[in-house]
Amino acid sequence: AALVRSKSGKLTAGLVAANNQQPTTNNQQQSKRLYTDWQFPTPDGRARFGAYHSKGLAEPPDPDYPLILTNGRLYGHWHTQTRTGRIPKIQQMHPQPFIEIHPRDAQKLGIEEGNLVEVRSRRGEAIFPAKVTKAIAPGTVFVPMHWGALWADNAEVNTLTHPEACPDSLQPELKACAVQLSLVTGDSQLKADLKSDMTFERSKPQSESTAVGAV
């Protein structure tokens, strides 16, 4: 016996057929887990593993865009916070997005902890508070992908990434693109408006945005 999900979405106790792919539901035909017999659709029935070697970045850094931006998850949040964005404890853990910058790069650019930083690529720009840390490698910056257009107008990391993909797997290279950084300067009202926008309370209806998280 195991917990299974009904068509209404409710979890109930039920029997799970042997070798069924999980998760499963009550009263629904399930496909069996593939290749449990170790037979694959090849002439000799054996699996084939392709040996792939890196061909380098699709968009390497250059003098105009000298840093590589990578993005990813924080352990407390789920995708674009559809499940975690209203949980106070998680919001306390991760209250706002940020950009991680190595101290050496931050010093070159005159950026200090907490400064607002504009990140610009060939496709767009975004603004994040700086987190100066040795946890990131020199020449690389990191932005979490959980905040998007539902939360703030200038915090969507996917406005920066490029569409290049692996020709075989078609997996997009969302984890690396060339960017430049600049310290946000100007009058104090501009900075106050930006910080106000970064309160990150969900203020926009779901229908207004199709923002998705980076993979």
Image: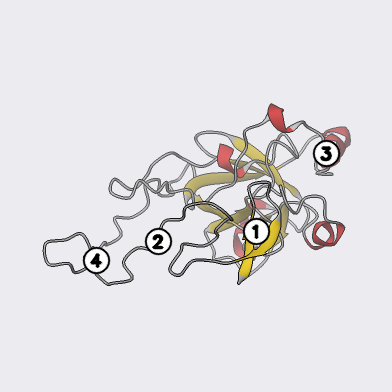
Secondary structure beneath dot 2 equals: loop
Cα distance in 3D space between marks 3 and 2: 56 Å
Are there few (<14), some (14-19), or many (20+) residues within 10 Å of tag 4? few
Cα distance in 3D space between marks 4 and 2: 23 Å
Dots 1, 2 in contact, CB < 8 A:
no
Front residue of 15/186: it is 15
Left or right position of 187 against 168? right
Cα distance in 3D space between marks 3 and 4: 52 Å
Where's residue 192, x and y in %? Answer: 87, 38
Residue annotated with mark 4? 49
The amino acid pointed to by label 3 is: Lys
Cα distance in 3D space between marks 4 and 1: 36 Å
Tell me the quarter of the picture where residue 16 sits: bottom right
Where's residue 202, x and y in %? Answer: 80, 40
Give whichever of discs 1 and 3 has the lower sequence position. 1
Left or right position of 50 against 181? left
Dots 1, 3 in contact, CB < 8 A:
no
Q: Nearer the viewer, mark 1 or mark 2?
A: 2
Q: Residue at x 76, y 31 (%)?
A: 205
Q: Residue at x 61, y 63 (%)?
A: 104
Residue annotated with mark 3? 191
Secondary structure beneath dot 3 equals: helix
Give whichever of discs 1 and 2 has the lower sequence position. 2
Residue annotated with mark 2? 32
The amino acid pointed to by label 1 is: Glu
Front residue of 16/54: it is 16
Where's residue 167, x and y in %? Answer: 29, 45
